[in-house]
C-alpha cells in the first residue's frame, strides 16, 4: 500500500520466510508483503530476500497465482541468458471494505489488493443502535462487494472509543450508546461470512495516515483525530499502539480546564468539551448557525466570528496537550485530522502555542504539528487496511498455523 514503507531496509531484513512446510501461511505473507512494497519481483530476488529455497518460492508463487492474488508481469531484461519472469500483486485479485461508524454518519470505502481506493461514500445515520446498524452494515458490505469480481478478504469497522470502560463507553453525545457487551466482530462476521476487524476511530485514522497521508514518510507519530469527540491514534516504529485493552490515546477525557465545562463522563473541563466537532456544533447551535461541512467551509472563508472564536479556544486547549504528547511520546510529528475541513485544521495549527518540549529541536525534518492528508475518510481507509494487515503482513506467531483463508495447498 505504501511503497515507502515497504522498501524500508529494516523491514526487509525482518521479512524472512521459514523453510519447513508448517510455515506455509507465514511464507505466503512474506512474499505478498515484499511484492506490495516493491511492485514486482522475480523468483531469484524473492528467494534471496526471504531466504527460502527456490523451490519453496516457486510453490508459493504457483499457489498465489492460482488464487488470483499475484500475476506474471513479463520478463526483466538483464544481461545474457533467459530474462527472469517478474511477478506482482494483482490489484483485482481481492478487495477489503472499511466502515467508519460515527454518531451521525457512516463512511464506507473499498480498497483493492494493491491498496488503491476504489470507492468512497458517506451516508447520514438517523439511528446508531446495534439493531439498526448491524443490518445496515451487512447490507452495505453485500452491495459494495457485489460490484467487484474479486475475493472479499475481510471487513474493517471502526467506531469511537473507548471500548467497555465504565463511565466513558456509551455515555454522552460523542459516543455510540447501546453497544456495551456486544461483540461487533462476531455479530457482523456471522452476518457477512468474512473476517471482521474492529478498531477505534483514532487508531484507524493513524493507520490511514500511514498508508495514504501525512504519515507515509514517518515511523513514529500521533494523530489527534477530530470525530464527534477527540481521540488520539499512535504509531510507533510503523506499528499502531493500542494498549492492553485497545484504548490507548483516549485524550478527549483528560481534564485541561479544571472546574470547566461539565462532561458526560462525570468530570469537568475535559479536552473534547473544547476541541471536538461536537464542541464546535454546540457553539454554532447556540448562535443559530448550521454545522454541516459546506456551511463550515463558507464560514471559514468569511471568517465567521463564532467559528473564529471556537478555533482560538480549541487551539488554546490543545496547546498544552501537544507539549504533553511530545514529552511523553517523542513523536516525529503530531498530525491533526478528522472530520473538520482542511482550512479549519490549518487555522487551529496556526494558532497553537508551542511550549518548550523535547520536540523543539533545530534539526527537525517536519514541523511539530501538521495537517493530515488522508482527509475525512482517514478512519474508513484505515478500517479497510485492517483486513489486509491481518491477511498479508508477516507474523511469526502464525508460522505454525495450518490455516490460510485465501490460499490452499500443502507445500511451503
Image (spheres, rainbow, N blue to C red):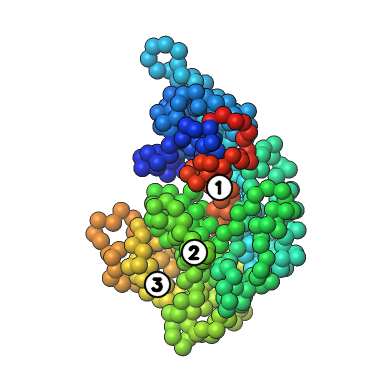
Q: Which residue is mark 3?
A: 321
Q: Which residue is mark 2?
A: 244
Question: Crowding at label 3, few (<14), some or many (≥20) Cα neighbours within 10 Å?
Answer: some
Q: Which residue is mark 1?
A: 390
Q: Earlier in the sequence, mark 3 or mark 2?
A: 2
Q: Earlier in the sequence, mark 1 or mark 2?
A: 2
Q: Is residue 234 left or right of residue 170?
A: left
Callout 1–callout 2 Cβ contact below 8 Å: no
Of marks 3 and 1, the one in the foreground: 1
Which mark, residue 378? none
Q: Quadrant for residue 409, please give it.
A: top right
In this view of the protein, which residue sits in the foreground, 165 or 311? Answer: 165
Decide: is 144 above or below 261.
above
CA separation in Å, label 3 and label 1: 32 Å
Q: Residue at x 57, y 59 (%)?
A: 199
Task: Indicate the position of residue 93 as horizontal and vertical percent values.
Answer: 62, 35
Q: Residue at x 58, y 81 (%)?
A: 264
Q: Earlier in the sequence, mark 3 or mark 1?
A: 3
Decide: is 333 above or below 315.
above
Q: Residue at x 28, y 65 (%)?
A: 358
Is residue 26 something one can see in this rendering?
Answer: yes
Decide: is 202 above or below 83.
below
Of marks 3 and 2, the one in the foreground: 2
In this view of the protein, which residue sits in the foreground, 103 or 81? Answer: 81
CA separation in Å, label 1 and label 2: 19 Å
Task: Indicate the position of residue 91 as horizontal and vertical percent values.
Answer: 58, 36
Amino acid at each position: 500500500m505504501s511503497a515507502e514503507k515497504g522498501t524500508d531496509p529494516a523491514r526487509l531484513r525482518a521479512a524472512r520466510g521459514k523453510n519447513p512446510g508448517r510455515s506455509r501461511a507465514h511464507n505466503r505473507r512474506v512474499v505478498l508483503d515484499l511484492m506490495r512494497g516493491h511492485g514486482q519481483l522475480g523468483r531469484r530476488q524473492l528467494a534471496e530476500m526471504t531466504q527460502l529455497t527456490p523451490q519453496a518460492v516457486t510453490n508459493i508463487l504457483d499457489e498465489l497465482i492460482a488464487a488470483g492474488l499475484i500475476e506474471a508481469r513479463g520478463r526483466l531484461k538483464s544481461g545474457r541468458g533467459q530474462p527472469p519472469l517478474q511477478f506482482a500483486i494483482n490489484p483485482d485479485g481481492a478487495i477489503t471494505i472499511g466502515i467508519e461508524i460515527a454518531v451521525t454518519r457512516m463512511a464506507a470505502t473499498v480498497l483493492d489488493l494493491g491498496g488503491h481506493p476504489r470507492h468512497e461514500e458517506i451516508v447520514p445515520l438517523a439511528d446508531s443502535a446495534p439493531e439498526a446498524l448491524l443490518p445496515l452494515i451487512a447490507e452495505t458490505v453485500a452491495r459494495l462487494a457485489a460490484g467487484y469480481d474479486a475475493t472479499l478478504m475481510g471487513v474493517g469497522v471502526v467506531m469511537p472509543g473507548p471500548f467497555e470502560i465504565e463511565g466513558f463507553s456509551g455515555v454522552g453525545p460523542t459516543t455510540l450508546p447501546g453497544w456495551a457487551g456486544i461483540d461487533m466482530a462476531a455479530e457482523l462476521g456471522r452476518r457477512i461470512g468474512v473476517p471482521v476487524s474492529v478498531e477505534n476511530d483514532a487508531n484507524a485514522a493513524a493507520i490511514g495516515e500511514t498508508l495514504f497521508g501525512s504519515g507515509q514518510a514517518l515511523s513514529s507519530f500521533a494523530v489527534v483525530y477530530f470525530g464527534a469527540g477527540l481521540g488520539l491514534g499512535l504509531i510507533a516504529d510503523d506499528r499502531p499502539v493500542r494498549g492492553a485493552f485497545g484504548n490507548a490515546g483516549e485524550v478527549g477525557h483528560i481534564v485541561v480546564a479544571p472546574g470547566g465545562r461539565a462532561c458526560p463522563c462525570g468530570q469537568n473541563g475535559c479536552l473534547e468539551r473544547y476541541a471536538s466537532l461536537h464542541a464546535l456544533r454546540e457553539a454554532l447551535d447556540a448562535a443559530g448557525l448550521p454545522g454541516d461541512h459546506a456551511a463550515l467551509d463558507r464560514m471559514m472563508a468569511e471568517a465567521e466570528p463564532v467559528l473564529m472564536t471556537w478555533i482560538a479556544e480549541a487551539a488554546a486547549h490543545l496547546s498544552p496537550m501537544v507539549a504533553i504528547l511530545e514529552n511523553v511520546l517523542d513523536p516525529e510529528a503530531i498530525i491533526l485530522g478528522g472530520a473538520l475541513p482542511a482550512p479549519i485544521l490549518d487555522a487551529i495549527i496556526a494558532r497553537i502555542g508551542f511550549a518548550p518540549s523535547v520536540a523543539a529541536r533545530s534539526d527537525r525534518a517536519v514541523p511539530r504539528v501538521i495537517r493530515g492528508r488522508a482527509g475525512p475518510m482517514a478512519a474508513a481507509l484505515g478500517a479497510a487496511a485492517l483486513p489486509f494487515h491481518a491477511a498479508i503482513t508477516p507474523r511469526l506467531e502464525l508460522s505454525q498455523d495450518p490455516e490460510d483463508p485465501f490460499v490452499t495447498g500443502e507445500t511451503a
